[in-house]
Image (tube, rainbow, N blue to C red):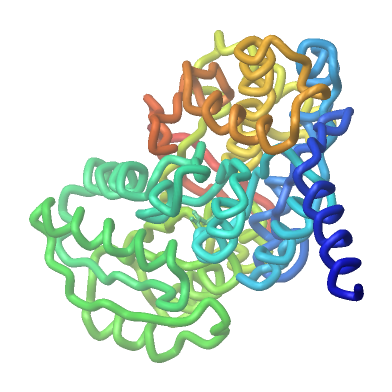
Amino acid sequence: MKRAALLIVNCLLFAGAAHAETVATPIPIGIALAQTSNVALLGEEEVVGAKIAEKYFNAQGGVNGTQVKLVFQDTGGDEAGAINAFSNLINRDKVVGIVGPTLSQQAFSADPVANRLKVPVIGPSNTAKGIPQIGEYVGRVSAPVAIVAPYAVKEALAENPRIKTVAVLYAQNDAFNTSESKTFQETVVQRGLKIATVQKFMTTDTDFTTQVTAVLAANVDLAIISGLSADGGNLVKQLRQLGYKGAIIGGNGLNTANIFPVCGKYCEGILIAQAYSPGGDPKNAINNALIKEYRATYKKDPPQFTAQTFAAVQVMVEALKKVEAVTKSKIGKLDLGKAREELNKAIRTGSYLTPLGKINLNQGGEIHQETFYVARIKMDANGKTGKYIYVK
Ligand code: 1QQ
């Protein structure tokens, strides 16, 4: 008797689970970014891009008249935080897709969770090798380091053809930095330069005396740093304070004005490759809209991470419109699982005219982007504030 009752309960539960759960309206899109920890130095600029996109696309009518609602979930700076954020967004908030996380290091842990549950993910700033290969539900709008990073080396050599020897430094406990440094090392070797020393550190390090001593002993013309904002900024500062005079290339982890308070006047001159330029195409209307909105609050031009996250939300919104066209149904009428599946397909169809220029995601989820840039940090006389000057 007991067993029979249990069986009935089980059947009911099963029927409940199988019952169609439709997409909520306004349409929930998950935003899983680093809003706390050191990684927030990078994630902060992404949150701004997402919020501007939400306002912009909803003012344009959202998804064919249905508004979208971004659901923010802080990932913190580590893998566990990202997994937790993804799980909450998927299971509790029933989002149709997720924009995030901030770091590749987090993506390698959290994206498999979404992939298993068939929830589309768009990485706004995951640039390590292998991100789209995590699974069929994983894509990115952040061009990979293998494509972006070499532009900085090219620019440094164009400016200073006498550069011959290089020191390479990278955070070995971070997937993106390890991947980016590999690209830098391959690039300098291809360019006929000599790598005089390779120095490793941790993203949690604050003292870089050992690494700086080795760089000074190697007497190099160029130092290339792959770190995140806090460690990378401190490393730059200590290099200069201890007397390093050569050129410095910073990787994507130093690509934020939030490093200015860290390295201060010593940030001067760092070259960083860019997947975005505010002035890239003056006729790009959506970029101009982003710039206008960003300037109204921040009195300066939007940085790369803001533009990339705006683009990630844009791809979600435009793909949702395509889902309605393909299914001949309003999103709010669709089964959540079906909506996620169709959204994942739609993300990979056609192209998007974003602030990054025209982009598309191939079937594997990898971005194709046309133009890249290089900027140099120019600090103000006060040694505290500064800006990115585009040199290419
Ligand atoms: C990655 C990155 C970081 C610098 C993003 C903030 O490119 O982790 O892939």
* Residue occupying the point 27% across, 71% down: 167
The front one of 97 and 81 is 97
In this rendering, the count of numbered labels is: 0
Task: Say which of 366 and 113 sits in front.
Answer: 113
In this picture, is 203 found above or below 279?
A: below
Q: Report x, y in % for residue 355.
A: 58, 24
**Residue at (58%, 37%) from the top-left corner?**
308
Quarter of the figure with the N terminus: bottom right
Outermost residue toward the front in this view: 1
Relative to 334, 253 lies left or right: left
Which residue is outermost to the left? 192
| Drawn side of residue 74 relative to residue 42, left or right | right
Q: Residue at x 59, y 34 (%)?
A: 341
Q: Is residue 286 visible to us here?
A: yes
Residue located at (78% from left, 58% from top): 88
Is residue 290 positioned above or below 198 on the image?
above
Closer-to-camera residue (91/131): 91
Locate residue 256, reporting x and y percent: 60, 52
Q: Is residue 383 visible?
A: no
Q: Position of residue 173 (x, y in %)?
A: 46, 78
Q: Is residue 48 above or below residue 27?
A: below
Displayed quadrant of residue 334: top right
Query: As drawn, is 27 to the left or to the right of 144?
Result: right
Placement of 228 over or under 137, stated as above or below: below
Q: Position of residue 239 (x, y in %)?
A: 43, 76
Quarter of the rendering occupied by the C terminus? top left
Task: Decide which of 293, 72 is in the foreground and name it.
Answer: 72
Which residue ends up furthest to the bottom in the rendered image?
210
